[in-house]
Structures are given as C-alpha cells and as structure tokens.
Image (tube, rainbow, N blue to C red):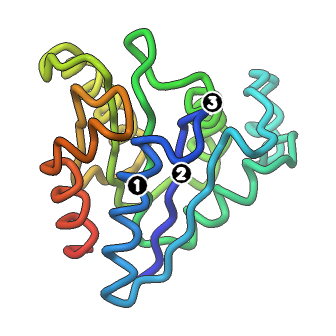
Amino acid sequence: MKITGVSGSPRKDSNTDTLINTVLNSAAENGAETQLFRINDLSIKPCQSCYYCKENGVCKYQDDYVEIVKAIDESDVFVVGSPIYFSEVTAQLKTFIDRFYSIVNNQGINTKLVLVYVQANPDETLYKPYIEAQSNMLGNIGFEVIDIIHGYGIPEIENLEENKEFLEKAKEIGANL
C-alpha cells in the first residue's frame, strides 16, 4: 500500500504535521510506503483559470504540484490536512486544491482520502459545516473520503499532547489503512 500525505500548514512540526505524520507512521508500521509533502516548502502557482488544461489535458504550469499529483495518482490513500485559519483551510492548501481543476477536467481522481483539520478554538461545532462542505467538495471531484480527524482546542503543540484522543485517532486510522 502506498500513502501520500500533504500538509497545508505554514509551520513545520505543527499540530497538522504531527497528526498527518502519526497516520503515516502508523500505516508504515504495517508495511505501507509513505511520503509527506509540505506545501509551504514547495513552489506551486495558483490556478490561472486559463483553460490550458481543458485544451491540452494537463496543466500549463509544470511546478511542484505535478510531482504531488503524480504521487497521489500512484497512491492508494491520500492524507491531506490543514489548520483552519479565518474559517478556512490555509492559503497554501487552497492554492493546491484549486489546481485540482486540471485533473478533474482530464483524468479525474479515484483515491481514498483522509482529511485532517486542526483548529485553536475549543468549540468542536464551530467549523463542522465548513469541514462537511470540504469533504463533500473533495468527494464530488472523485476522492472517497474514508475518515476525518478534526482536532479542536489545540492552538499549540503542547495542547495536542494534552488532547491525546486526536493522536490516538490518527494512530488508529493509520493502523487500519
């Protein structure tokens, strides 16, 4: 089994990175081949809505996005995560997701998906409608959403250590992949 992870967090070793890595490491313990891409460390141009992909079957911009999409296409499971900033995923992840336009219009997506969301606010219900909308949108473009980790009330890494249920869920998901 091959699993590709993508973190939309701008901070290295963030809560988002930790939860994604926990899923990946747990899966690797069962023999899965895993890799993680940190969008903030890469060069990904925003979608320009130029329709080049519609006419040519591929995106005009051959940047780091292409490598990630190739990895996702070769994977059985895609794990993607982001902190929630101002009620949405980060700009880094939004830029990446917008580029899915090029593959949705061409070869499509057919990969299982685990979503990871982290928020500082302790109100679990605050962003549930947004998370559901994201899950539906990604499902509508071809991903099969198989699980969601929604960590709330964890503004700093030490708060994640205090709320071990999120880490335990990440381990369980990875072990079951």
Which of the two labelled residues, at mark 1 and mark 3, occupies the earlier sequence position? Answer: 1
Residue sitting at 59 percent across and 44 percent down? 12
Viewer-nearest of labels 2 and 1?
1
Amino acid at the residue labelled 2: Val
Q: Is residue 49 left or right of residue 9?
A: right
Q: Nearer the viewer, residue 45 or 156?
A: 156
Q: Position of residue 149 (x, y in %)?
A: 24, 45
Crowding near the residue tagged with mark 1, few <14, some 14–19, many ≥20 C-alpha atoms within 10 Å: many
Of label 3 and label 2, which has the lower sequence position? 2
Q: Residue 60, image x and y in percent? A: 87, 40
Residue 90 or residue 166, whichever sits in front = 166
Image quadrant for the N terminus?
bottom left
Asked which secondary structure carries label 1, the reply is: helix
Q: Which residue is mark 3?
A: 92
In the image, what residue occupies the spot 27% across and 36% down?
A: 159
Q: Image height check: is 129 above or below 105?
A: above
Furthest residue to the bottom? 31
Residue 6's mark?
A: 2
Dot 2: few (<14), some (14–19), or many (≥20) neighbours within 10 Å? Answer: many
**Residue 86 numbered mark, or none:** none
Direction top: furthest residue: 86
**Circle 1: residue type:** Ile
The image's mark for residue 20 is: 1
- Label 3 is placed on what type of residue? Gln
Q: Position of residue 91 (x, y in %)?
A: 60, 22
Badge 3, how many Cα within 10 Å: few under 14, some, many 20+? many
Secondary structure of the residue carrying tag 2 is strand
Does dot 3 land on a helix, a strand or a loop? helix
Give the residue drawn at x 64%, y 28%.
Answer: 95
| Alpha carbons under labels 3 and 2: distance apart | 11 Å
